[in-house]
Amino acid sequence: MNWVGQVGHVSAKDIRYVRWPILALLAALGMGTSSFLTRNAFGPLVSTGASSTTVTLAMSEATVTWLPLVIVVVGILAIASLVQADRPLQADSFWTTLPLAPSAVVVAKLLLAIVVITTPSLVAAAIVLTRLHTPSGVVLALLMHAALVHLLLLLSTIIVAAVTEDLKGFVTGAVVLFGCLIIAMTGIDELLSHGIDLPAGIAFLAAVAALVVLTVLYRGRRSGNRQRVIGLAAALLAIIGATAVPRFQISSVPMRATGPMLSLKFGAPGQTSMQLPFVVRVNDTSMARFAFARERTVIHGERGAVSLTPLHDTIVVGRQFPDIGRPIAWLNPPFDYPALGQLAISPADLRAVEQRATSAELSGVVSVLRPRILTTLPLRVGAFAEHDGRYVSIYGVSHDSNRVSVYVQLVSPPLIERRPPQRVIANFSRGEAMLLNEHPSAGTGSGWIVLPWISVASSFDQFATDTRMSVPQDGSWYAGASLIAVDWIPTERYNTSATMRLR
Amino acid sequence: MNAIEVSHVSYHYGRVTALRDVELTVPEGALYALLGPNGSGKTTLLQILMGLRRAASGRATVLGVDAAHFSTADRSRIGYVAEGQVLPGWMRISELEAYLAPLYQTWDSRLARELSDRFALDPARRIRALSRGERMKLGLLCALAPRPKALIMDEPFTGMDALVKDDLVRGLLASSGAEGCTILLCSHDIGELELLADWFGFMDRGAVRLSAPMDQVREQFVRVDLTLPDDRSLGAVPAEWMSVETAGRRMGFVVRAESQNAARHMVQTRLGETADVQLREASLREVFVALASHLATPSPAEAA
């Protein structure tokens, strides 16, 4: 039997061996996927008691928390038991006496981890994301990230299982590894707090190291403390590598050399002496908005320059009302966009600002945002839409003489460069629209889609008109109205900086 | 031509030396019985021959191939059975056979069925439900069904009843004789080995102390039983008399000599012609005990 035949033959045996865990895995995947496809996963959760019905504004915890964990744990146990059935560190393991190439045995295990354990999970996640009409580029990016994290975790599992003798040993090894991981991550967190990111290359390095160590273990088939230590070190590196897997960005926003100038001006100090407000204005009359992400702040004074503590805040300025595709009369009065930023200043920096500072220099990146309609829903309870990777549903509508409120749930996987959409109520036949303000959220939650490496967030929010504006009193206005969710999509970026005189 | 050759092989478990400069040759077609007390290094040597462990120094070849560099084709020509071998307990016997058969070009399904019948193994039974003896039988079935050119067996008779052992011995003899399969086995079941083996090796403290054809062993190891005359006392027992037993004036021991006549001559030189001496070929058990006890006792030189 040639090498490929051996891989296939061992794989077939392995699948038979772990058929029950695999069936359990597939059942969990089926349950999770169907829960998303029937939208039960999104909530709200309704429980009917003897005398009352309770509505919980949350996603189904069983689907978005427990099932992904079960899927990972079942996968880990399946691959661990499989590896221990053909252990490399036992001189007279059954497989070592057979005419089998060690590389064929280890490749069979890796294939099973990829094809039978990881791929069905990715397929299930892809089905859910596609059902949400997630852009294919984003689906690909999310799945690639999840696949690499999952495979690194399984590689780590395979190594720990290879250097331990039984399930008890595996669990002990995993606990030791977990302890080492906590210590390692504490050190890594320390690095990250100093602005040093884990390079994505660690993930690649970890994968290569894990594969090399596995090959050496299977080829050498030597049992000893040295092999165990090397194995556990490689497993630890694989887990750390999993945390460094990059989030792939398929559609990057192009960086331009210049753009509309932003002017910055300090306002009066805030109530807390630690903050100093500043106002951002933009010299632009287009339909765009501008998101200024501050990256660096330097206070120049008589004694030199002081860099303030990095604070990556973002301030949005520019167009007040979105373009919703047709001429419309906005019922909201024009208002001044709250383009107010706050400089966080340490006590030492504050003295410099108050006493001898002459100017402040702010620099950062401006993203140009343009409006795009995410979805248009009839203004009634139960209306929903799945579009651009998000699920939007109306779970409440109310209006009186002063105010209109719409209660909206938004479920969203981590999409690249997406901000919460803006909400508008429009009646196109009347040619009128109202911009809604977001009120404190009634409920937020997060969880995962199929695997813990694909997160999903949900928020139940109230959107309402400003009480200072007059809202339509005619009930038929609302009967023919629609809720429009508008995304502000970043289309280009440029660097900018501005200097403000302080005195 | 030798099917198995071991040359200057050493192996260590940490600081403990398991094998020290071992030399061994097994001729093609031989059925070689390797005996030795517990901890003498037999299992380690067999594992090195199977390529399951790598010798620290020296070279071990099976069927002309270095055991450290077996290809899958080489491995398919060598069968291996070990007492502690881990079989996949989750499989049924029939599933194990179905798994193994495609791995060997020479797998003989008919022989597998015959062995299965002979060993009374139910193909539908799960391996984890088998007794120790039944597992050994299954291990043997798996090793014999591919009709290997060399068969390495470590305690293959463990847990087997006398009837099956007898059957197995006949099967092994048939394999060795008719098909030219070379068999190297170690076992504590000396009675069975005596029927089987045509070569005999004795290991002690990590070294092969004796390796010879069985005929030669039978010829050279002589059991001596004698009654001392009333007027004679033996004095110190000569060092070359092994496994000495005394009861009153009766005495028995094993000596190594060129022939029985040479042994008689040796005894009479020591005791004179008056002694009532009976000689016969020593049994394998007597040879084993004699060598084991003789080597365990330090020689005057070692003691010094």
Image: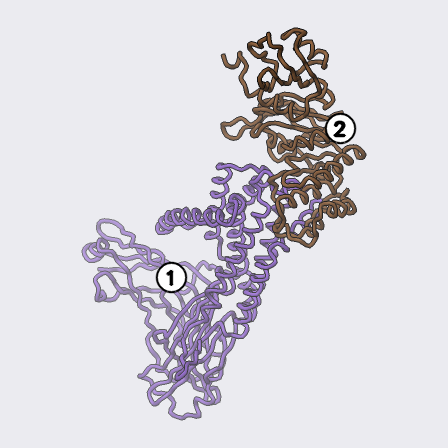
Chain colours: A purple, B brown
Residue closest to the eye, A338 or B292: B292
Residue type of the residue flagged with mark 1: Ala
Mark 2: amino acid: Glu
Q: Is residue B173 left or right of residue B191?
A: right
- In this rendered view, identify the residue nearer to me: A41 or A436: A41
Q: How many marks?
A: 2
In the figure, B174 relative to A481: above or below?
above
Residue A120 is drawn in which quadrant? bottom right
Q: Is residue A88 left or right of residue B162?
A: left
| Residue A69, horizontal then vertical, whole percent | 48, 61
**Front residue (pair B275, B113):** B275
Which chain does tag 1 point to?
Answer: A
User: Circle 1 is placed at which residue position?
Assistant: A293
Numbered circle sitting on residue B28: 2
Location of the C terminus of chain A by quadrant is bottom left
User: Which of the numbered marks, if any, corresponds to residue A367?
Assistant: none
The secondary element bearing badge 2 is classed as: loop
The spot of residue B288 in percent (x, y) is: 63, 25
Task: Sort mark 2 into few (<14), some (14-19) or many (20+) by Cα contacts within 10 Å.
Answer: some
Position of A501 with respect to A49 (left or right) is left
